[in-house]
Amino acid sequence: MNGKDLSNTSRTNWVALEAMDDEGIDYSDIPPLTEEFFEKATLRIPNSQAQQLIQIEPDVLKWFQTQGGEYKTLINSILRLYIESHKQSPYNNSLGTD
């Protein structure tokens, strides 16, 4: 985006749009999403959100949450300690996952 893009003024009537209910929206100019679309689609997640994508079993998460303080910071600290303890290992490149 350049400075020229910032000077464009929206011609949208925001008051009328906010007053409109869902049934009043005209979607006729939007093509339907086909199977072909979804076959070619790529999921893109911003890095800041991707950092939050980890599956933790409910009982494990609950235990961390009961430890008090910032449980996400605690989880991160424990993972960092694990990494640090494995840096001395001969399996350094795989972190012991061989």
Image (cartoon, rainbow, N blue to C red):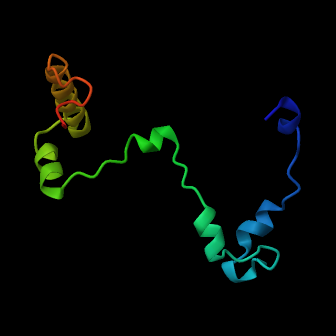
- Residue at left offset 10%, top offset 40%: 67
Q: Name which quarter of the figure residue 6 lies in.
A: top right
> Image quadrant for the N terminus?
top right
Q: Position of residue 9 (x, y in %)?
A: 88, 46
The one of 70 and 49 positioned closer to us in this rendering: 49
Say left or right for 44 vs 52.
right
Question: Looking at the image, which is closer to me, 68 or 55?
Answer: 55
**Image position of 47 with respect to 19: above or below:** above
Residue 27: horizontal and vertical position, in percent? Answer: 76, 77
| Spot occupied by residue 39 in the image (x, y as percentages of width and height) | 59, 67
Identify which residue, 27 or 22, lies in the foreground: 27
Direction from residue 51 to residue 22 in the image, left or right: right
In this view, the residue farthest toward the bottom is 23
Please report the residue visible at 18 percent of the width from the left and 50 percent of the height from the top: 61
Q: Is residue 83 above or below residue 19?
A: above
Q: Position of residue 82 (x, y in %)?
A: 16, 28
Quadrant housing the C terminus:
top left
In the image, is residue 54 above or below residue 25? Answer: above
Looking at the image, how many numbered discs can be counted on the residues?
Answer: 0
The part of the image, by quadrant, that contains residue 75 is top left
